[in-house]
Image: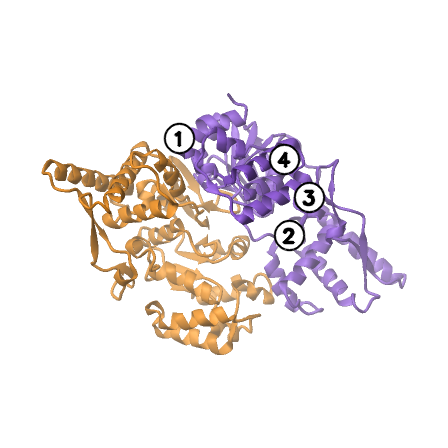
Chain colours: A purple, B orange
């Protein structure tokens, strides 16, 4: 187990304080205060072939208090940074929604919509390369459920992921506050649906496979992606992704692997290029004669887009996507229950995970 | 704490076995096998003024193997009952989706769509007055998160809801398997959003209010409603519901209180007529000068429907709905952060809960 170097919230506070000091320095020198923010526009988002995830290129824009059109936004950025510094200092967190409402009491006045206050947060995240969670800002969504031989510590509680109930240990939105204490598992098996999660817990697959079983619950929350990244880096566990055999399932897996374009500014903290897809493929549909649904027009359109996407350019994906298009069929991960409830646990997954 | 009389899964098995015996008896007597199923059509759903929730009236239809148009469906009902009996006997559970796929291997052949297999399950539930969860069928959705002085037992694990992590103890879909071991709380405070849940946990409101804090996560899952019902009946705790001040928030609260029309056949296990709404009202919008959003056309339409709904016929609701229509505004539960993050915990809720 590799220990993390520094408390990420303290690191974030360091960035905010440095930001504040620079502005004071600017003012002392009668320089207009300013901040450089990487551009998050489509033209500045690139797929980094070496890192194997989406990242931002070098284009930056400067926000300055000397520009009348930017001065209010600049002041709001300072207020937001101050709000975050207070959160970190008091050990608290707030949702983006709460920050939006709190801003009604700021000297700058509030925002006209939450979109605008969210964008200020993204500015701060990308300017300093810190995650909003480490700034004390809490995503609304629940993290994944985990079952298996893992012990974590958070807020002074030690929690065993086999003793938090059958629904498992739930990853808190503030994954940065969680410390890994002990781990007896050798791999992580992350699955798309709660149905499959409960199947794996019930059949004790977490024990048989020596795995942490993680329920992604569809498109995974940021906290879940951060958990998987840290399990991969700090615990050294390989990550396996078991999703439905359809364009959405592929997308869920690929966002974990290579990050999304939208979060390009923070993918270095989230993307796991070595995570492995063990989801349902077009070949599985044929080999296992799975019950299927017909591809919809929107599925066909999406699959054709994936064929052109740099993240899907290797041979495996090209072959499977083309095969799915020719079959005109998709299949869900629960479709294996055609052969009995245990089949997916006893036959399909051990083969995919090279356990038999 | 009131103990439950019987294991609900054993009770469900009793119903299934009796059903099987009756059919064998029919066959011995060369009577056509049949089953009576209460009608779930709109005309048979009534609001029971005495019980204060939606329930089914007396109309029943008879499914019989002697009718060529019903014989396949009748046989599928038998197969589904057999599938459920096996689940109960083996102590397993399956999702509705898994049952749908498993049916491909039944002597009757599979269903043309999951809607049809789901309806068979509803037939069995309403014919015998048992919940699908007790038949071993697992809803897909996650239950709520709970934080507070509660100890439960499930699958031989004892779980303390203050020691399962900050995200709390998650109610499993099979709420029927959970036993209450100990409870130090005096009330349940159920809130609409995870954001408000984390605020209450962070400010230690669960301790100050002596409450179990429950995150409904929008429209609550069946397992959550069952938890609230059992906390009310078995633990004798009053239930308070804190939602947004908008038609959806009112609906979320009212479904907990009086049940939904759709689940009329099972509301006796879910509805909590004495649960109290402490959500944001139109009066609160005025009294607290809350940040608001303008009502949409769909909100206005919905509010007008609620005025005619028997569940909202008392003076409080009529007054608040009319006032909201005249203000043309709605407000979220997080809007109190206008006065600081702690305000909702230190001022608003203690007043609503009569704690100060």
Q: Position of residue B326 (x, y in %)?
A: 48, 78
Q: Residue at x 11, y 35 (%)?
A: B28
User: With B184 as the anchor, is B287 left or right in this view?
Assistant: right
Q: Is residue B147 visible?
A: no
Secondary-structure class at tag 3: helix
Q: Name the front one of labels 2 and 3.
A: 3
Farthest residue in the right direction?
A29
Same chain, labels 4 and 3: yes
Q: CA distance from mark 4 to mark 3?
A: 24 Å
Q: Is residue B271 left or right of residue B346?
A: left
Q: Chain of mark 4?
A: A
Disc ID at residue A267: 3
Could you say which is closer to the camera, residue B242 or residue B182?
B242
Q: Nearer the viewer, residue B227 or A281?
A: A281
Secondary structure type for disc 1: helix
Residue A49 appears anywhere in the view? yes
Return the residue found at the far left.
B29
Chain for disc number 1? A
Q: Which residue is mark 1?
A: A339
Q: Which residue is mark 4?
A: A318
Q: Quadrant of the N terminus of chain A?
A: top right
Q: Which residue is mark 2?
A: A136
Q: Are marks 2 and 1 in contact (CB under 8 Å)?
A: no
Q: In the image shown, does B333 or A85 lie closer to the viewer?
A: B333
Between discs 3 and 1, the one toward the N terminus? 3
Residue A255: x percent and y percent?
A: 62, 42
Residue A43 x/y as whole percent: 76, 51
Q: Is residue A254 left or right of residue B128?
A: right
User: Which mark's residue is nearer the viewer, 3 or 1?
Assistant: 1
Q: On what subunit does the disc labeled 2 rest?
A: A
């Amino acid at each position: 187990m590799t220990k993390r170097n520094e408390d990420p919230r303290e690191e974030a506070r360091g960035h905010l304080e440095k930001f504040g000091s620079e502005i004071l320095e600017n003012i002392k020198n009668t320089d207009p205060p300013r901040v450089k923010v990487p551009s998050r526009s489509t033209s500045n988002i690139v797929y980094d072939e070496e890192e194997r995830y989406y990242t931002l290129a070098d284009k930056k824009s400067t926000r300055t208090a000397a520009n009348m059109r930017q001065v209010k936004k600049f002041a709001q950025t300072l207020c937001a940074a101050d709000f975050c510094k207070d959160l970190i200092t008091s050990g608290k967190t707030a949702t983006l929604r709460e920050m939006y409402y709190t801003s009604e009491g700021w000297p700058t006045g509030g925002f006209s919509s939450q979109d605008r206050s969210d964008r200020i947060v993204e500015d701060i995240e990308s300017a300093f390369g810190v995650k909003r969670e480490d700034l004390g800002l809490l995503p609304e969504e629940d993290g994944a459920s985990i079952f298996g031989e893992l012990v974590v510590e958070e807020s002074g509680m030690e929690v065993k992921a086999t003793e938090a109930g059958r629904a498992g240990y739930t990853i808190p939105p503030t994954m940065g506050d969680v410390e890994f204490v002990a781990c007896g598992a050798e791999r992580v098996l992350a699955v798309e649906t709660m149905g499959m999660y409960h199947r794996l817990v019930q059949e004790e697959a977490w024990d048989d496979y020596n795995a942490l079983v993680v329920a992604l619950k569809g498109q995974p929350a940021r906290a879940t992606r951060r958990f998987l990244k840290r399990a991969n880096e700090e615990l050294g566990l390989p990550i396996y992704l078991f999703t439905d055999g359809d364009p959405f399932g592929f997308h869920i897996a690929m966002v974990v692997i290579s990050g999304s374009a939208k979060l390009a500014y923070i993918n270095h903290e989230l993307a796991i290029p070595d995570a492995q897809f063990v989801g349902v493929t077009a070949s599985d549909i044929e080999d296992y004669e799975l019950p299927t649904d017909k591809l919809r027009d929107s599925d066909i359109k999406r699959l054709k887009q994936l064929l052109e996407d740099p993240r899907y350019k290797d041979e495996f994906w090209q072959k499977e996507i083309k095969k799915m298009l020719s079959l005109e069929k998709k299949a869900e991960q629960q479709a294996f229950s055609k052969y009995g409830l245990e089949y997916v646990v006893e036959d399909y997954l051990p083969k995919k995970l090279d356990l038999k």
